[in-house]
Each structure stands twice: as structure tokens, then as C-alpha cells.
Amino acid sequence: MPYGFKDFREYGAFVDVLKAGLPENTSIVFKGSSVSGRSSPYSKILGAPFDCGRLSDYDIALVNDDLYLKSLGFGRSAGFKVKTMPDRIGPLSTEQASLLGLREMQKILSQQSGRPVEFMFYDNISDTLKGPSHIFKLGM
């Protein structure tokens, strides 16, 4: 179970909202410090424990071909660009999440968990597993 949840019931309620708000064939993977317990090398505070001296967020990787292609269709003019190593899009801005119909779910999850929730799209499941990862659902 990722860091930040009081118990399995709270975690289950969180993933229930995710499942209800995403297409059926979506793979959901928790990434980053909620899995490893420490901030990444790309964070402002390298190696800081989860929630120590700051409020940590939940980084949620999503693998869904339709959503990935839809975001590519909006293109750079909407701020969607593919980052590399591994290939991904995001974290999504508020505007991008709105364009893709994910903003309301993101707000609900943030309110429910009391922390920011960030979405990223990966084009395949193997790339999501690079680095600390907790697979919730494989929708493939």
C-alpha cells in the first residue's frame, strides 16, 4: 500500500474513485515517493522522507492508448509534449486534465486524500515500472 493512506479502507476508497473515473482498460500505477518513501532525485529536496517537512503528492501513472493518443492530438499548443526516459506525458496541468475530462476526478481525489494528485500518461506499462512503482490495476 502506498504511503499516505491511514489504512486499506482509505486506500480502497481512493482507488474506487480512480476506477470509476477512468476507462476500463486503464492500467493504474502509483509512482514516486508514495511508493519509495523518499523524494526522487528530481525533487527540490533530494531523498526527503514522504510527508517530512512538506505535504507529499500522489503521482499516478496511467496507461491507456486512447487517453495517450487524445493528449497527443491536442499537441504542444495545449502544452502536451512527450518527455523521454521513460516516454511520458505530464504531469498534467489543471487545464490539460480538464481537456481530457480528468479534472473533476483529480479534485475529488485531492480532497479525499488531503494532498495533490498528479496524473501522467505512459505509452506502455513497462516504462511505468522504471523506478519505484506500485501497480494497482493492469487493464491490458
Image (spheres, helix red, strand yellow):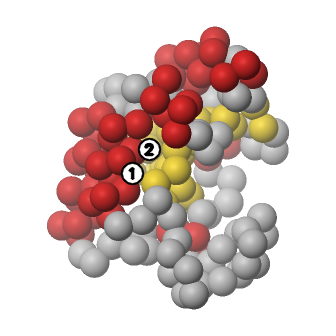
Please state which of residues 73 and 107 is positioned toward the viewer in this rendering. 107
- Residue 25 got which mark? none
- Give the image location of residue 126, x and y in percent: 63, 42
Q: Measuring 54% from the left and 32% from the top, which residue is drawn there?
A: 95
Drawn side of residue 53 relative to residue 16, left or right? right
Task: Give the residue furthest to the top.
Answer: 73
Q: What residue would you read off at disc 2?
A: 28
Q: Measuring 52% from the left and 39% from the top, which residue is drawn there?
A: 94
- Give the image location of residue 112, x and y in percent: 27, 60
Q: Residues within 10 Å of mark 1 (few under 14, many from 20)?
A: few
Residue 134 in sight:
no
Q: Looking at the image, tell me whether mark 1 or mark 2 is earlier in sequence order.
A: 2
Q: Could you tell me which secondary element the residue under label 1 belongs to? A: strand
Q: What residue would you read off at disc 1?
A: 136
Q: Report the amino acid beneath label 1.
A: Phe
Q: How many numbered circles does the render carry?
A: 2
Q: Do labels 1 and 2 touch, CB within 8 Å?
A: yes
- Give the image location of residue 52, x and y in percent: 55, 87
Q: Residue 17 falls in which quadrant of the image? A: top left
Please state which of residues 117 and 68 is positioned toward the viewer in this rendering. 117
Q: Measuring 33% from the left and 38% from the top, which residue is drawn there?
A: 104
Drawn side of residue 12 relative to residue 113, left or right? left
